[in-house]
Image (cartoon, rainbow, N blue to C red):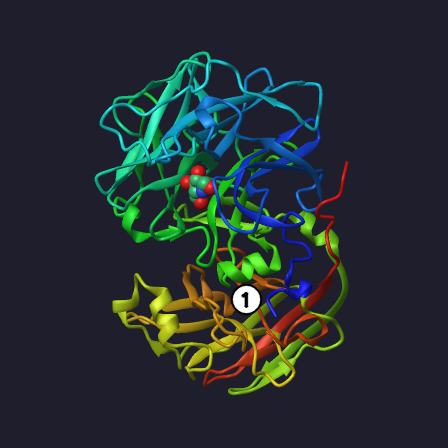
Amino acid sequence: FVTNPLLRTGYHFQPPKNWINDPNGPLYYKGWYHLFYQYNPRGADWVNTLWAHSVSRDLINWNLLGLALEPSIRPDKYGVWSGSATILLDGTPVLVYTGINRQDIPYQVQNIAIPKNKSDPLLREWVKPDYNPIIVPESGMNVTQFRDPSTAWHIDGQWRILVGGEKGSQGQAYVYRSTDFKHWVRAKHPLHSAINGMWECLDFFPVLMQGKKGLDTYEHSARVKYVLKSSLEKARYDYYTIGTYDNRTESYVPDDLNGDYHRLRYDYGKFYASKTFFDPAKQSRVLVGWANESDTVPDDIAKGWSGIHAIPRKIWLDPGGKQLVQWPIEEVEQLRRKSVSVTNKVVKPGDHFEVKGLETYQADVEVTFKIRSLERAEPFDQAFSDDAQKLCRMKGADKKGGVGPFGLWVLASANLEEKTVVFFRIFKDGHGKPVILMCTDPTMSSLGRDLDKPTYAGFVNADISSSGQISLRSLIDHSVVESFGAGGRTCIISRVYPSIAIGKNAHLHVFNNGDVDIKVSRLTAWEMESSKMNNSV
Ligand code: DQQ
């Protein structure tokens, strides 16, 4: 059943076939958004990858251009791995990426590519100057853990770029500086380091302390905070901290000194190797990320494709300053078609109702739940305060609770033997303060075998006591369920492969498995049109 074409996404980015992973070097140039991505042109499994290239006017509808960077020079002969784009001061985009230069071990060096023809808005051809590689590991460095250069930023006449690494068990954000973007010298100390393994795909960018407007990487003032994101190779999650950056000492200090261990994540689901970029057209910072498959590699090869990208998300600092907020870019709403709304509907304990009158295998659902009282909320066990996922595994969607679990059954079969559950469960801590858990429970998502069905969960930092309500949005797309709790304070994307609840056999329900009434103040579900994914230009 995994080869059923109805499990391919309709509006989440993927090329026509084969393997993809990390988004690379997203950028905006002369009216076009450019997305590069790790790609295997020969099959649906990971081999030493290269960069494929798609362009878009809106980050939702894509044109496929082909390959942008292939192994072609000594410093990238055995692989063109991840990297980033920087727009130079004169407006020229450049790509900096990791090349693998040895066959026996993945020895990593950093290379640059520049457009052959700057007047081509599609940037079809890239040239690798003969001064490559621009950065090589020094003696004593772990040469197979030295990769994924970040977007560069410019302050006081100097460029800085980050390269991720590992020293002992410490993740490293090495800083390299240059005045001409050719010759790079490492700053004595890393920007930051911490004990948690290799830091892949580092991203470092400023955010305004107030408002949703995004900033370019070089905007540096007293009114900004910085975000440092690392993709932790072992955990396969994207973690970030918020902090301050001092360009004189070239150091970054997280506001929460334990932040490296408190583990804020962009997304509590299957979301990895993400990257942000500044969109000058919309003046916003946009996050793109990869969601891999949850089936087996032989299944991927049989179906001929593997990997999708999440819907690009606008990202900004929460007014409290302690976390980021993410929301699908508004352009995705152009795909909304037929809709159905439900208002002021009470769901009694143990009840559920189906949202009828539309197809929901490719849909966008927004719902606001009203909770009359938190009196019956279950007591929160502090032992789980750092492990939402474990709590959710124990108290899955079908375990009765006090306030919740309540939420959505998506991609549900007619007889409900298959369903993916996206829900909230509200607890009360020792001081009577609500603790909100958001989960995606895929354990019943498919009767198919050999599927990885991890329960994903995160806590939601939202004020439910005074508002008495909480919102949920889910973007459903055949084998993707991408959810945003409380306006994007907590996000969970997961991959599921129903064997019955496919296409027109997929249903959508609202359920309440708690002990108190929950009111749906408003629910709107839209059928989503497919985006143009791989058109030619
Ligand atoms: N994938 C790339 C690496 C990166 C990893 C290779 C993260 O450059 O560290 O495909 O998914």
Q: Position of residue 370 (x, y in %)?
A: 55, 73
Position above or below: 492 against 383: above
> Dot 1, how many residues are within 10 Å of its Cα: few (below 14), some (14-19), or many (20+)?
many
Image quadrant for the N terminus? bottom right
Q: Is residue 422 visible?
A: yes
Tell which of 417 and 285 is nearer to you: 417
Image quadrant for the C terminus? top right
Position above or below: 225 against 175: below
For disc 1, the marked residue is 496
Report whether 171 appears left or right of 131: left
Q: Does the residue tagged 1 have its C-beta within 8 Å of any atom of ligand 1?
A: no
Q: Position of residue 380 (x, y in %)?
A: 31, 73
Q: Position of residue 56 (x, y in %)?
A: 69, 39
Residue farthest to the front, as pictured: 104
Circle 1 sits in a helix, a strand or a loop, which is it?
loop
Report whether 207 appears left or right of 258: right
Report whether 37 appears left or right of 254: right
Residue sitting at 69 percent across and 69 percent down?
360
Q: Position of residue 271 (x, y in %)?
A: 48, 53
Tell which of 423 and 430 is nearer to you: 423
Tell which of 512 and 302 is nearer to you: 302
Tell which of 188 and 242 is nearer to you: 188
Q: How many marks?
A: 1
Q: Is residue 494 visible?
A: no
Q: Quadrant of ligand 1?
A: top left
- Quarter of image, res 254: top left
The amino acid pointed to by label 1 is: Val
